[in-house]
Each structure stands twice: as C-alpha cells, then as structure tokens.
Amino acid sequence: MSIKTIIIPVRDLAAARSSYRSVLGVEPYADEPYYVGFRVEDQEIGLDPNGHSHGMTGPVGYYHVDDVTACLRAAVGAGWHVRQDAKDVGGGRLAAVVEDPCGNVLGLLQR
C-alpha cells in the first residue's frame, strides 16, 4: 500500500490536458469529460474538472488500501474527519477523503 494516485483539480480541462501531456511526456490513458488520467511508471496523475466544486483546493494524494471502510473507521478513531465518505468512482474502485486534526487532506483508494 502506498500513495500512487494524485488527483489535481483543474478549471480548464482541455488546457490542463495539453499542459500535462507536454510536461509528463505521455498520452493520457483515460480521456473523459469528467477525468483525464496519466500513468507515469506506477504513478497515476489525474485531472478533475469538478474538483473545485467538490471542495478541492489543491492536489490530493490517494493512499491505496485494501479496505477503504476499515481505513475510514481507523482514521475517525484517531481523530480525523471524513470530508468525503467512500463512494464508487468507477471500475469497482472506492474512494474517500479524510482530514487529519491539523487540516491536512489524504485520499483513500480501494481498487
């Protein structure tokens, strides 16, 4: 388990797609109106045009876990707050977002 996914909120998906394609030097593996995803080795970098409207103020790193529900329980038990409960994000993946007591955000992703 590790942080292998970073989701970045963007306002102009077409411009961001072009910019990240140039900087990363790879074509997106996913190119949808709601998400553009790039893979660079074992790292995924995703562009989310709806991120700002869902409260994202910057990139969120997603820690890959075996059981997102158990991880959410552990985080809450440790004094963290749930910003986004577990939800299906497609392809059988579940994602949640938590905030530590200092206001730092961490995503949880179950594949």
Image (cartoon, rainbow, N blue to C red):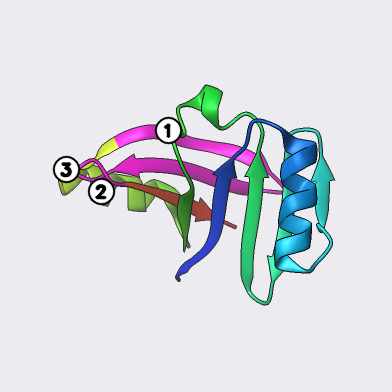
Gap in angstroms between the C-alphas marked 3 and 1:
16 Å
Q: Give the left or right position of residue 10, taking residue 107 as reference.
A: right
* Quadrant assignment, res 29: bottom right
- Nearer to us in this view, 104 or 107: 104
Residue 21 location (% of width, % of height): 78, 58
* Quadrant assignment, res 26: bottom right
Mark 3 residue element: loop
Residue on which disc 1 sits: 84
Main SS category, magenta section: strand
**Other-residue count near label 1 (Cα within 10 Å), few / some / many at <14 / 14–19 / ≥20:** some
Q: Are marks 3 and 1 in contact (CB under 8 Å)?
A: no
Residue on which disc 2 sits: 75
Residue 56 circle label: none
Report the magenta residues as a range.
82-104
Residue found 63% across the figure and 74% down from its top: 42
Q: Are marks 2 and 3 in contact (CB under 8 Å)?
A: no
Residue 101 circle label: 3
